[in-house]
Amino acid sequence: GLRPAISLLCEAEIYTPLRKQPQKVGGPNKMALNIEAQKTLFHSLVEKNIHRDGIKELMEWLDSTDFFEAPASTRFHGAEAGGLCAHSIAVAREIIRLARIFNYETVGGEKKQIYTDEQLFLVALFHDVCKVNLYKQSYRNVKNDETGQWERVPCYNFEESYFVGGNGHGDKSVFLLVDYIKLSADEKAAINNHMGFSSGDARAVGDCFDHNKLAVLLHTADMLAAYCDKT
């Protein structure tokens, strides 16, 4: 029978509740992300599924950044403390789901897995490391619809300090990762193009997707995690 891509992952673990009890944050009740629980789960997923040379050093570097506390964006998906880690875990969940159906090819009449579990978890968990130390907390004034009063609430501002050119996103993640671990051509291309056709030249991105199923899986998982996964 086929070996499921989820072989090293317990679904119950990936669905571990990651939010604290509701708490009041500048207005309506909001569920705050449990940053410590997310960090523990992220470390566990890496330890169980990624065994590549340099992963220890990569995780030590990641721990020295704001990865686990940072938002995933300033005002779109995951625009809250811990949003970046939460999004990365969600992308791992989605790519595993997709891999059950699409991560196979027929060779000699038999279906075989194309990409290893390690590759799936690697590109999913680390595709957005470009966002570390990128968003700085600030404040803005927002009008409270209930009271009519203006309130000072926290927000995040985009402040880049590591300039690589290109799209400054997927390619930046690749730049950062290869300082610690070796990536295959497919892994580099998948991470570089995970934003899909907004990653760069549309024809080049399309050519990548035509020849690299890992890139398609990662991009699709990223979109599902950002727009459909509200857990």
Image (cartoon, rainbow, N blue to C red):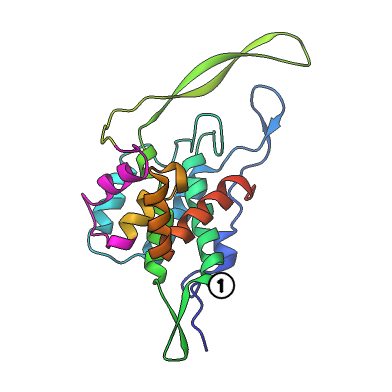
Q: Residue at x 44, y 54 (%)?
A: 42
101 or 144: nearer the eye? 101
Q: Residue furthest right?
A: 146
Q: Is residue 43 visible?
A: no
Q: Is residue 23 magenta?
A: no
Q: Residue at x 27, y 32 (%)?
A: 162
Q: Residue furthest left?
A: 179
222 or 118: nearer the eye? 222
The spot of residue 88 in percent (x, y) is 47, 50
The spot of residue 200 in percent (x, y) is 38, 42
Q: Is residue 111 above or below residue 138?
A: below
Q: Is residue 3 visible?
A: yes
Amino acid type of the residue that numbered disc 1 sits on in the rendered structure: Ile
Q: Is residue 215 above or below residue 51?
A: above
Count of marks overlaid on the render = 1
Is 188 placed left or right of 216 in the picture? left
Is 24 placed left or right of 79 in the picture? right
Q: Is residue 183 magenta?
A: yes
Is 61 placed left or right of 15 in the picture? left
The spot of residue 32 in percent (x, y) is 60, 37
The spot of residue 28 in percent (x, y) is 72, 27
Residue with the mark numbered 1: 101
* Few, some or many residues within 10 Å of mark 1 (<14, 14–19, 20+): few
Q: Is residue 95 above or below residue 129?
A: below
Q: Residue furthest top?
A: 149
Element assignment for label 1: helix
Q: Residue at x 56, y 72 (%)?
A: 101
Specify start and end residues of the magenta stretch as a single range. Answer: 166-186
